[in-house]
Amino acid sequence: MPKALITGVTGQDGSYLAEALLKRNYEVVGMVRRSSTVNYERIAHIQDSIEFVNGDLLDQISLIDAIKLHEPDEIYNLAAQSFVQTSFGQPVLTGETTALSVTRMLDAIRIVNPKIRFYQASSSEMFGKVAEVPQNEATPFYPRSPYGVAKVYGHWITVNYRESYNLHASSGILFNHESPRRGLEFVTRKISYGAASIKLGLEEKLSLGNLDAKRDWGFAGDYVEAMWMMLQQENPDDFVICSGMTHSVREFCDLAFSHLGLNYKDHVVVDEQFFRPAEVDLLVGDYSKAQKVLDWNPTTTFKDLVTMMVEADVALLQRRLKGLT
Ligand code: NAP
Ligand code: GDD
């Protein structure tokens, strides 16, 4: 039975990846950091099938000990300070967590067992002020946030350790991917939850920032499959994973509200506090390399994604109103 260690198992992607690996009969070890309350909401349904290990990306010894104790065949490094807006307010923490911790993990692998296969969660945010449209594996990086800068570091240190120490280390350059398990502060979930709250009469308005930003949005469940596929290749490499389509925040609002019989123009208000010091205006990727080498394809359309998220939030709020959760 292969064994995988997932950092960030309590996050959106960690929960979908754990599910996908359990279905493939993996032993799944989830690394969790200490917090004052248990935070297993996204993995509650599979919690009994996961083995947990304490560790923090900021603490080198905890990473080494986790690997020594559990002897994984594969490590998926999904943990990060992942919210772009927060990275402007906490740039040093973001650098420590999202950038330098990748080196901590790679060193832990190098020291304990260099045969472990490693996946790094790179990001389309690295393309930032895009040099070309669409973006592929050869597109130069121009990050526009401390988060994007940190991810560029994490990406290149993964390439460097692959070339220096012959590690099986791959990076997935993933474009935005969403789901009903997305954090509430990210724009898609903020919209689906906001629209559902308005529909049920719990709120009247939804405050957002830049409605003209465009993103290449896909479904997280599809994207974690690509992570696994990368580590099954004979040789490590980097792959862009995306839908190949781009839509604005405004279009997301339009679809989400109209699915509930509402007009977003009656409810969405633009609030300067949600604008960023530097913005990424447009992202749209080209996943032809992943299609050719991994045989990976996205399966969820933009419309299906928006519908899935809105319906899940309506159901969630209805359960809450009935006192069931
Ligand atoms: P997420 O929901 O924000 O989850 C982040 C995870 O990191 C959580 O489990 C969090 O644990 C953990 N974490 C944060 N700081 C940590 C620390 N110091 N030590 C240990 N664990 C720590 O993020 P996601 O959307 O699943 O994204 C997964 C990864 O993919 C991230 O690296 C993100 O930057 C990257 N990425 C995401 C997207 C996307 O669109 N979702 C696109 C490209 C790349 P707690 O639960 O304890 O907070
Ligand atoms: N969060 C948020 N809240 N974003 C808003 C809002 C708002 O109220 N209003 C407009 N936006 C715009 C942002 O300015 C940005 O242009 C876009 O919506 C998407 O914002 P987020 O959903 O916060 O995601 P992101 O693109 O900044 O970052 C996500 O995707 C990256 C991949 O490109 C995160 O998941 C990153 O971790 C990931 O690497």
Image (tube, rainbow, N blue to C red):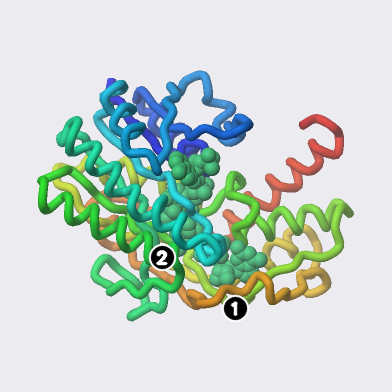
Looking at the rendering, which quadrant does residue 195 occupy? bottom right
Residue tagged 1: 212
- Residue 176 visible here: no
* Circle 2 SS class: helix
Q: Residue at x 19, y 31 (%)?
A: 112
Dots 2, 1 in contact, CB < 8 A: no
Q: Which residue is drawn at 80% across and 53% down?
A: 197
- Residue 188 visible here: yes
- Mark 2: few/some/many CA within 10 Å (<14, 14-19, 20+): many
Q: What's the mark number on residue 237? A: none
Q: Which of 292 and 48 is in front in this view?
A: 48
**Left or right of 271 in this view: 62:** left
Q: Which of 317 and 103 is in front in this view?
A: 103
Residue tagged 2: 148
Q: Which residue is drawn at 33% across and 30% down?
A: 4
- The amino acid at mark 1 is Asp
**Left or right of 188 in this view: 292:** left
- The amino acid at mark 2 is Gly
Q: Is residue 295 above or below residue 289?
A: above
Q: Nearer the viewer, residue 30 or 22?
A: 30
